[in-house]
Image (tube, rainbow, N blue to C red):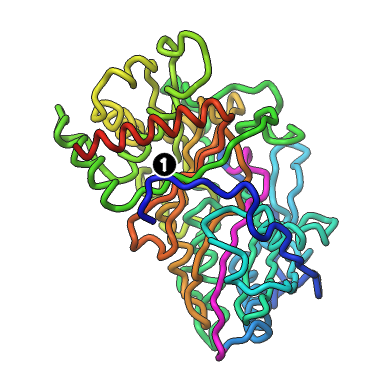
């Protein structure tokens, strides 16, 4: 991808993938799970909604779709033994009001589907096609009792297939979902052990007793609703608007130029000038300054982004911790400061947000959730799928050609996801949805700042 931005065609060549469900069933772990309830941390509590990912596999004559389907079905049955909560259902603890998982063999959903098209007929996989929803949501709709996990395999005419995975976000963050996929893939091989046994002890992230809130946490918004009793999670709820959708593609050369600019302006050599920090700073500048409001220069802008706390806690969480071990870091500044100040200053503020996430800060945020019950609070969130490495997972039939989240256009969430070729390409795609006037300004600023980084 040579250009710095690309616009999704207003009419994708194929929006209806003509997916037909051939079979939908509940499947069960190959061993009966021990009946118990699994505690959810305060981070898990506020993520009670489903996330879908899609994984596209090229045709492999040694593993036609029917063979891959049988292996995936068997693999899911086997992997539900170490992931003993996966066949369970959510319930509310009547004493505490908290959401928990009731471990039982209620089953995970498994769906087999076909499409009339070849994989190469549906267009560039990077562009979120509305038709992609048929590759997983069509299967999810077949189940009435809300399984925590549904897997749909859709075969293309050419022998390629897509694996759609829908899981409740309360179960996994990005890192633990990647480990789940690695374990699932391992069980599709013949007689291969689970490579990374999950750590299912979510009480490792329980609040302290009594809770000790030692920081103000402006990145969190207090809610009056008791924990677990909200009807739908209001995380970044926004009114429906007519949004323009664009993908801005940054190559490794673009990212290196941004790093070089920040280094040239640096006044503090301790600041980490990473690929994520420079990309986040660029996006923050463009998003804040494109806001359609009078006296925008006087407005305070806050960007949020997830930080993995596994290695930041003392003692550190096991890398295989299964659950949500990410918290929202933040950077705030007046728009005038973002517009007039050097690029390095924005990079430094983004870096500071991650540095702020120490063991005590993370524990304070978890304890804050115990007292107040809150959600992320900012102008917008950068959600990064850039380096999760979902398309590095090796199945018996090879790695996915491309893996991506199922995208819903939101003006308050900007997605980062890798190019085809995965993490190794070091390129990143920035998915932005904004009202027309704001998008015009965002795009102009994006190109302006990118050009200035290369002069």
Instruction: Pick whichever, 434 or 328, lies toward us.
Output: 434
Which residue: 80% across, 70% down? 21
Q: Is residue 268 left or right of residue 107?
A: left
- Mark 1: give few (<14), some (14-19) or many (20+) Cα within 10 Å: some
Q: Is residue 14 left or right of residue 313?
A: right
Magenta residues, start to end: 44-62
Q: Is residue 315 above or below residue 281?
A: below
| Position of residue 73 measured from the top left corner of the image (x, y, whole percent) | 68, 77
Q: Is residue 183 above or below residue 388?
A: below
Which quarter of the rendering shows the N terminus?
bottom left
| Position of residue 358 measured from the top left corner of the image (x, y, whole percent) | 34, 36
Query: Which residue is tagged 1?
Result: 307
Element marked by disc 1: strand
Residue 244, picture quadrant: top right
Most extreme residue toward the bottom is 62
Instruction: Pick whichever, 222 or 301, lies toward us.
Output: 301
Most extreme residue toward the right is 144
Residue 30 visible in the shown view: yes
| Position of residue 48 measured from the top left corner of the image (x, y, whole percent) | 67, 44
Q: Is residue 301 left or right of residue 70?
A: left
Residue 88 visible in the shown view: no
Which residue: 52% across, 83% down? 396
């Amino acid at each position: 991808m040579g250009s710095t931005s690309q616009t999704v065609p207003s009419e994708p060549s194929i929006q209806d993938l003509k997916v037909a469900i051939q079979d939908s069933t509940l499947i069960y772990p190959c061993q009966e799970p021990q009946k118990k309830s699994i505690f959810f941390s305060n981070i898990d509590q506020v993520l009670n909604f489903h996330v879908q990912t899609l994984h596209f596999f090229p045709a492999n004559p040694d593993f036609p779709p029917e063979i891959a389907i049988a292996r995936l079905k068997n693999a899911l049955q086997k992997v539900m033994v170490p992931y003993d909560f996966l066949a369970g259902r959510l319930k509310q603890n009547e004493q505490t009001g908290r959401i928990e998982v009731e471990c039982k063999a209620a089953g995970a959903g498994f769906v087999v589907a076909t499409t009339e098209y070849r994989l190469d007929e549906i267009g560039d996989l990077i562009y979120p096609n509305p038709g992609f929803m048929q590759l997983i949501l069509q299967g999810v709709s077949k189940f009435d009792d809300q399984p925590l996990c549904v897997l749909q395999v859709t075969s293309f005419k050419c022998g390629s297939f897509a694996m759609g995975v829908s899981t409740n976000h309360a179960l996994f963050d990005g890192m633990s979902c990647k480990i789940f996929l690695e374990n699932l893939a391992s069980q599709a091989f013949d007689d291969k052990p689970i490579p990374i046994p999950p750590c299912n002890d979510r009480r490792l992230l329980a609040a302290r007793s009594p809770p000790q809130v030692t920081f103000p946490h402006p990145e969190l918004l207090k809610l009056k609703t008791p924990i677990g009793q909200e009807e739908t999670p209001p995380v970044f709820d926004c009114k429906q608007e007519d949004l323009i959708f664009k993908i801005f593609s940054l190559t490794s050369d673009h990212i290196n130029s941004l790093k070089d600019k920040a280094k040239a302006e640096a006044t503090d050599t301790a600041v980490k000038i990473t690929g994520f920090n420079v990309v986040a700073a660029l996006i923050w500048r463009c998003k804040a300054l494109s806001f359609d409001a009078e006296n925008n220069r006087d407005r305070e802008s806050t960007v949020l982004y997830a930080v993995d706390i596994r290695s930041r806690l003392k003692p550190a969480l096991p890398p295989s911790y299964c659950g949500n071990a990410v918290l929202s870091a933040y950077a705030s500044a007046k728009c005038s400061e973002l517009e007039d100040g050097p690029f390095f200053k924005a990079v430094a503020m983004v870096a500071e947000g991650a540095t702020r996430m120490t063991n005590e800060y993370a524990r304070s945020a978890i304890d804050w959730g115990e007292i107040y019950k809150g959600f992320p609070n900012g102008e917008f969130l950068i959600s990064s799928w850039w380096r999760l490495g979902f398309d590095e997972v090796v199945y018996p039939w090879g790695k996915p050609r491309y893996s991506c989240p199922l995208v819903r256009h939101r003006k308050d969430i900007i997605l980062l996801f890798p190019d085809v070729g995965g993490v190794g390409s070091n390129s990143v795609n920035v998915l932005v949805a904004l009202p027309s006037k704001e998008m015009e300004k965002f795009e102009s600023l994006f190109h302006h700042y990118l050009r200035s980084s290369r002069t």
